[in-house]
Image: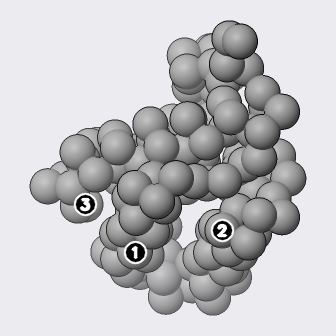
Amino acid sequence: MAIADVPQAGVKLQLVNYSSFDEIVRGTPDKRHVDDLINMVNIAELLADKFEIGKEYLDLIYKCQDAIFSMAQRGISGKTFRFTGEELNVARDTMELHSEQLKLTTVKQMEQALKDVRDVYIHRKARVIKPLET
């Protein structure tokens, strides 16, 4: 069974992702919205790399990780948590890709991807977002 077929998981996950994306686009985000997008793109990377679900789009996923990182850096530096035009397009395309991934991802694969992402955070292997130097 695919994640997208489980209303309590797939639909809720997509709603969280798109809601956070919309808050950023509207210019009314908080840290939680940025964290939601970071989690989304990191899960997308794992699904593509480890489970080969959308593997041909890894370059797009990496660009999205960079876009979210840059946007978050600007935000914690006192500017707004907003995407540039190019970053917005990359993030939007990755959101659509991730929605398609969820249609093909099994519950077991998602559980493993969530565990792997959690392990990266626990072991502090994730890229740390720091304020821009002025």
Three-letter amino acid code at disc 3?
A: Ile
Mark 3 touches mark 2? (CB < 8 Å):
no
Q: Which residue is mark 1?
A: 96
Q: Is residue 66 left or right of residue 79?
A: left
Q: Is residue 70 visible?
A: yes
Mark 2 touches mark 1? (CB < 8 Å):
no
At horizontal 48% and vertical 43% (from top left) the residue drawn is 67
Query: Where is residue 121, by image quadrant?
Result: top right
**Mark carried by residue 129:** none
**Mark carried by residue 25:** 2
Classify mark 3: residues with Cα within 10 Å, few (<14), some (14-19) or many (20+): many
Q: Which residue is mark 3?
A: 53
The spot of residue 35 in percent (x, y) is 71, 47
Label 3 vs 1, first from the N-terminus = 3
The spot of residue 63 in percent (x, y) is 35, 43
Instruction: Please tell me how many numbered marks the rendered image carries.
Output: 3
Badge 2 marks a residue whose secondary structure is helix
CA separation, marks 3 and 2? 27 Å
At horizontal 68% and vertical 34% (from top left) the residue drawn is 74
At horizontal 71% and vertical 12% (from top left) the residue drawn is 134
Classify mark 1: residues with Cα within 10 Å, few (<14), some (14-19) or many (20+): few
Mark 3 touches mark 1? (CB < 8 Å):
no
Three-letter amino acid code at disc 2?
A: Val
Residue closest to the eye, 112 or 132:
132
Relative to 19, residue 41 above or below: above
